Structures are given as C-alpha cells and as structure tokens.
Amino acid sequence: MKKRFITNLALLIFLNLLIKPFWFFGIEVGVQNRVGEEMYGFYFSLFNFAFILNILLDLGINNYNNRSIARDHLLLKDHLSAIVPLKFFLAFIYALVVLVSGKLLGYTEEQFGLLWWLVLNQFLASFILYFRTNISGLQYFRTDSLLSVMDRSLMILLTGFLLWGNIVQQPFRIEWFVYAQTLSYSLTLVTVAVIVFHRSGPVLPSLSIARSLAILRLSYPFALLILLMSLFNRIDSVMLERLLPDGREQAGIYAQSFRILDAASQFSLLFATLLLPMFSRMLRTGED
C-alpha cells in the first residue's frame, strides 16, 4: 500500500507541478495584465460568487460517492443511475439561487452576462469532479491523475493562443478567458464521462425522491465542510467588489496576492484525493 500510495502521489504532484504553476502565474497573470485590474476584478468577484454557491451543485455527494465506490465497486452502476439525475436537479436549483442572489445584490446586466457563463462552468466542473470520484473510487489513480490536469492543460493552450498567438487583432477580452474555460471543461467532461460509462455499461437514469433524500442525508457532513471552507476562502473578493466604490479594481489587486495562496492550497488537496478512496477501500477489505 505504501509503495502504491507514494508512486501515485508522486505522479499526481509531478503533473500538477508541471501544469498548475504555469496556469496560476502564466495564464492568469497574463490575462490580468492584458485586461487590467478593474476588469479582472470584475471577473474574479463574479467567479468567487459563483464558486461559493457551487456547494448546491454537490451537497457533499462527490465525497460520499468516492467513499462508497471505493468500498464496493459494484455500486458504480446503481450510483450513476441515481446521482446523475439528482445532480441535474441540483444544477437547476444552483442556477436559480445564484441568479436570484445576484439580483438581490444589485448586479448589472453586464455582470449577469458573464455570470451565466460562470454558472455553466461551475456545472461542468462539478460533473467532471463527480465522474472523477468514480474513477478514483475504482482505484484507477493514474487515470484520475491525468484527468486532474486535462482541463487546465486545455485552458493553457486555448488562452495561450489568444494571449500570445497573434490570431486576433482585437485587445484581449475577459469574456474570451471564460469561453476558453467553457470549451476546456466541455471537452474534459466528455472524456471523463466516456471512461466512466465504458466501465459501468449502459445506465438508465432514475430520479427517486426517497433515494435522493437518503443520499443527501449521508452526504451533508461533507457539504457543511465544503461550504464553510468556500466561505472562508472566497467571500473576500465578493465583499470588496460590493462594498468599495472602486471595488472592481480592489478585487483585481486582491486577486494578485490570493493567487499565491490558491496555488499553495491546491497541493494540500492532492493528498485528500488519494487518501479518501484508498483508505475507504482498505477499511472495507481489511488491509493494513
């Protein structure tokens, strides 16, 4: 087990060290330098607003599913049939809450124009993470490691071409950055879904209220933890943008420093993505 954990962790860290620093300090910094602090702060505050509420897309289901599949691989097909339609329902609730909350906060038409795309991106990212919990739960850690950097790799290629490829004559727009994320997430979602459904076989979606409530009861401790962590880490930029007269610019300046914290915190989460399914499987099989 020790050898397996160390080799898979080494691969995961290597891939993330290869991709994530360039994303944070190359692409994100490049985008901010092109659009300026004010426009980047405009994007950053909306992104964090959508990110905080994305707990409604998950409600702890991903961690619950990861643990369950790791303990019993035969649950894969049954969980897919119940959880996929449930997550679509939660996506509708999430979009509704985000847009209503944005209206209550006084967001403008310009902000809603970008917020719609960020809501879509959060939906795609949530489904990618859900399908990845099935892959890591099945103990395919190398496959999961490669998928963990696929979306960022595609974003680096797409945004890099827009930033430095001289393929457009117009000044770089923050919307292009968001569209590149949408396309990257979409391609990654198709890839990870094909892998999971190839492993599970045909799945017939079945939305049962009783089953859904049972899943949510088991997953709510994970949901509470994620919600509190999201509020702690992401609420600052939203408050800066809303409370200050020059909130957009200040949120953009704040993003420059937050980027370092965000990059560092990503690596601590890598251990959890391996340890939860691995330990769950060990407890189920009685391994030491």
Image: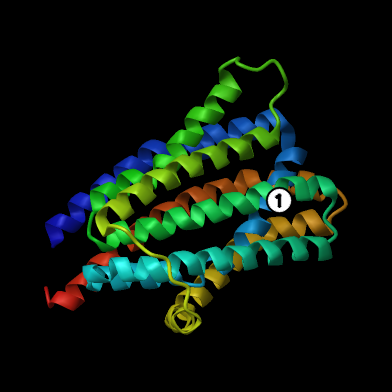
Q: Is residue 194 visible?
A: yes
The quadrant in which residue 36 appears is top right
Q: Quadrant of the N terminus?
A: bottom left
What residue is shown at x 56% (from left), y 30% (from top)? 159
Question: In the rendered view, would you say 16 is above or below 219?
Answer: above
Q: Position of residue 115 (x, y in %)?
A: 71, 50
Question: In the rendered view, would you say 280 is above or below 245?
Answer: below
Q: Position of residue 190 (x, y in %)?
A: 42, 45
Which one is nearer the viewer's eye here, 152 or 270? Answer: 152
What residue is shown at x 69% (from left), y 26% (from top)? 172
Secondary structure, mark 1, is: helix
Question: In the rendered view, would you say 129 is above or below 26?
Answer: below
What residue is shown at x 14% (from left), y 61% (from top)? 2
The quadrant in which residue 168 appears is top right
Q: Is residue 279 visible?
A: no
Q: Position of residue 138 (x, y in %)?
A: 24, 61
The quadrant in which residue 174 appears is top right
Q: By what rule are the colours in the image chosen? A: rainbow
Q: Is residue 9 left or right of residue 226?
A: left
Q: Amino acid at mark 1?
A: Leu
Q: Is residue 216 left or right of residue 47?
A: left
Question: In the rendered view, would you say 77 is above or below 38?
Answer: below
Q: Position of residue 215 (x, y in %)?
A: 43, 79
Which one is nearer the viewer's eye here, 165 or 17? Answer: 165
Q: Is residue 23 left or right of residue 106?
A: left
Residue located beneath label 1 in the image: 115
Q: Quadrant of the C terminus?
A: bottom left
What residue is shown at x 46% (from left), y 80% (from top)? 221
